[in-house]
Image (tube, rainbow, N blue to C red):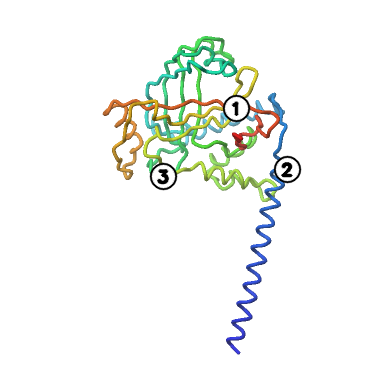
Amino acid sequence: MLTALWLRLGSWLGKLLLIVITLGLLGWALATAWFAWQHRGPVAAQEQIPAGEAAMTQDTIRTAIKIVDQHRENTRYLRDAHAKAHGCVKAQVQVLDDLEPALRQGVFATPGHTWQAVMRLSNGNAYPQFDSIRDARGMAIKLQDVPGAQLLPGQQGRAEQDFVMFNHANFFVSDVAEYRQNIAAQADGQKAMAFFPSWDPRSWQVRHLFIALATLAPAPASPTQTTYFSVSPYKFGSANAKYRVAPDPDSCPAYTLAEQNQKLPNFLRNALSQQLSTDRVPACFVLQIQRQNANRFMPIEDTSIEWKES
């Protein structure tokens, strides 16, 4: 009798498990179909500025200042994000001699031209932590002695152009409104609320949470061995474009980095110093440009959407 009872229970649990799996697969298929239907081209090629964006931007700046004050160490102020730098290094950005005409825009207008630059490599967290901890990894390139008028008021004396990137192709927020809500939750110490702002399931940002988790990558062997993405698009002549910087070791002298002790808190800084300072071997990257095709789903107003290459 007991054996028969266990067999019935096992049969019932097996059927229940099959139903749950079937419903889960059906839900996944429906969600995938809905997402594909909602996210299809064509899309706008011109910026659509929502009402109140300027005010939201100012509010975000105030929150960032609040985070900086929270992280202050006596007289030492840290950034609100990417607080820990592995190093700021001298760099050169060379425009290809045979760059196709359509890509000859802005600082890339003159084939063969070489820009002097400074590159900052960093971890993404607002608190400096061990490099071995999963984190975003950032790259910022500042071109120097760039002619032309600055768009921002009060910046006319600056002759620079910045490229700001990190190690994932899309961002964990869609727009300024979401970023404002996300950073405010983190500033208040409510990280869970960053992606679940209310009890209303319609406000939950589950997909963005998974993007954020994917961004928190294991540490590379060196900051020079990571690919970086601009995430947001920028004006590129009359087009819109995103940037990507990928390692290009074939353009530099052959080099094998000595194995680093990843238990050390700053081993990425050590790896960078080992190659560039101790061994005096340059690191090479290729800076790539991806132009928007407005007939496909490549929106300029949603940074959580990756622009597919094909």
Type of amino acid at the residue the image marks with label 1: Pro
Specify few, some or many for label 1: CA neighbours under 10 Å numbering under 14, 14-19, or 20 or more. Answer: many
Please state which amino acid type lies under the numbered disc 3.
Ile
Amino acid of disc 2: Trp
Please identify the residue farthest to the left as the structure is shown.
Answer: 278
**Tag 2 and tag 3, C-beta contact below 8 Å:** no
Which numbered disc, 3 or 1, marks the residue closer to the eye? 1
Residue 244 in the figure: left or right of residue 222? right
Measure the C-alpha gap from mark 3 to mark 1: 29 Å
Is residue 23 positioned above or below 89 on the image? below
**Residue 119: x, y in percent?**
42, 24
Vertical position of residue 216 compared to residue 291: above or below: below
Residue at the spot of label 3: 133
Q: Nearer the viewer, residue 178 or 167?
A: 167
Q: Is residue 228 left or right of residue 305?
A: left
Badge 1 marks a residue whose secondary structure is: loop
Which quarter of the image is occupied by the C terminus?
top right
- Numbered circles on residues, count: 3
